[in-house]
Amino acid sequence: MEFDYVIIGSGFGGSVGALRLSEKGYKVLVIEKGKWFKAEDFPKNNTEVKKWIWEPKLKMKGFFKMTFLNHVTALSGVGVGGGSLTYANTLPVPKKEFFNSGSWGKLNNWEQILAPFYASAYSMLGASVNPILFEADKALQNIAKEIGIENQFEATKVAVYFGEPGVKVKDPYFSGKGPDRSGCTFCGACMTGCRFNSKNTLDKNYLHLAQQLGAQISAEKEVFDVIPIDNLNGEDGYTIHYKSSFNKREKYTVTTKAIIFAGGVLGTVPLLLKLKQKSLPKLSEMVGCNVRTNNESLLGVTSINKNATNYNKGIAIGSILHADKNSHLEVVRYGDDSHFFRLLTVPFVYSKYALFRFFGIFGLFFVKPIMLFKTIFAKNYAKRSTILLFMQTLDSTLRLKLGTITKLKSVKEQGKAPTAFIKEAQELAKKFAKQVNGIPYANFTDVLFGIPTTAHILGGAVMAEDNSKGVIDKNCNVFGYKNMMVCDGSIISANPGVNPSLTITAITEYAMSNIPIKNTKI
């Protein structure tokens, strides 16, 4: 079977492409390595690891993946709808600095050009302002008051249908063309999959509407080869080979006139690196370069207060503090009984030296033994805990390469390597801990090895003026090949410093707007 477009991946880039190309009359196939998820398929909490974590080799067929690289631990989503299944719904527009920096900064007046596409993305994702601030949000607001920047605190704009809690209504977004929805119950479980039909995941908007126009979605399938039909530059299209995600013996072949890579950084970049070695040798040498971590720090704070049982009430991220022009802090929640991360975290000790951190953790048992005991063995752990997501626009980059032992490895590229020890994040975490009477914790890789954790790994197929500086042009077309695009987080060419999902959506909307309506004349 031949298609006009095959899209590899169904996240914030792939879903936009599926709808907009279908609207223009193209025959579209979306190939997604993860599963279709219905509300009842999602875990009740993140201790149901087989339903939550994606690791097929261990028979875990969920939608959340942790990738341990040399310089960063990356969190990502897998499934029909990509990262929207597990992200925190938050849709901020980056500050001006983002649009003018990085390899893409001088290619266009991006802030102006993308403005209408941000508006389209907001509309499609059903964005609205979080209507209620709960305990963790109020603690962050108190910190803003304490440091004199209360005007920099605000409720987040999020992809959630609020309506009347738990009440089912007909599609409120697309004149009845979308699925029925139910009002948010503020259970805090957005990131373990919304079981109440309130989260505006991509299968409820872009992909849902694309299917109505004829787009096909093949789930639980993984692409392993892309070969130009003419064996040259793809002008005549491509032959795509793919296989079952769970049974490697099941293999399939399809031909297409054009292809869009949209599998996210951890899907697209490894695939492009592999294809460059054989089937697509003309890909830029910059594949895998300019990878960014959004300069993130993820710290958890657990309160010792017995009555602290509401810190996970609300939506996953309900508020944001713009700490300075480069830095942003959000409070993050998980739903009741989601205490998986307690197994991976240790008390956060700030030091450049690993030995000092190691002994510092033990030192806390002597300095604050009661607090440590109460947080480590806290009942209602999720209700007492808040994750602090700190992000910066300040720049440093890594390069991803294919590994020998592991499938993927990172090497330092430009600027300082990502660090788990960002002073501004530490200071804010201390203030938050004081607000809630708690102790800061962090992933063990952060504290013991200084390797930070990021929920927003970006880049690896960045925009640039030519193939000596990037992988794609300003319209997301791949250098060296015809009829080939990249539309996902790997195209982000500077640190946005805020959650990037909206920006990926907007840039893809822009890229699709440049593709003409299909010519049906014979």
Image (spheres, rainbow, N blue to C red):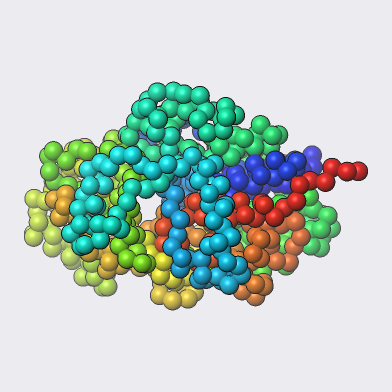
What is the x, y in percent for residue 287? 61, 66
Is 27 left or right of 371, judged from the image as shown?
A: right
Q: Nearer the viewer, residue 425 or 25?
A: 25
Residue 240 in sight here: yes
Q: Which quarter shows the N terminus?
A: top right
Q: Is residue 242 visible?
A: no
Q: Residue furthest right?
A: 522
* Label total for image: 0
Q: Which of the 4 quarters of the picture holds residue 28?
A: top right
Residue 92, image x and y in percent? 43, 53
**Location of residue 410 in the rendering, given as x and y in whole percent from the top left corner:** 49, 66
- Residues 167 and 79: in front is 167
Could you tell me which residue is drawn at 21 percent across and 49 percent down? 139
Compared to 385, does 104 lie above or below? below
Front residue (pair 101, 342): 101
Give me the residue at 13% from left, 63% from top.
363
Image quarter of the C terminus: top right
What's the residue at 50%, 51% (across, down)? 502
204 in relation to 454, above or below: above
Q: Position of residue 444 (x, y in %)?
A: 30, 57
Residue shown at 67%/57% (left/top)? 485
Residue 311 position by quadrant = top left
Side of 420 relative to 494 (left or right): left
Up/down of 364 relative to 205, above or below: below
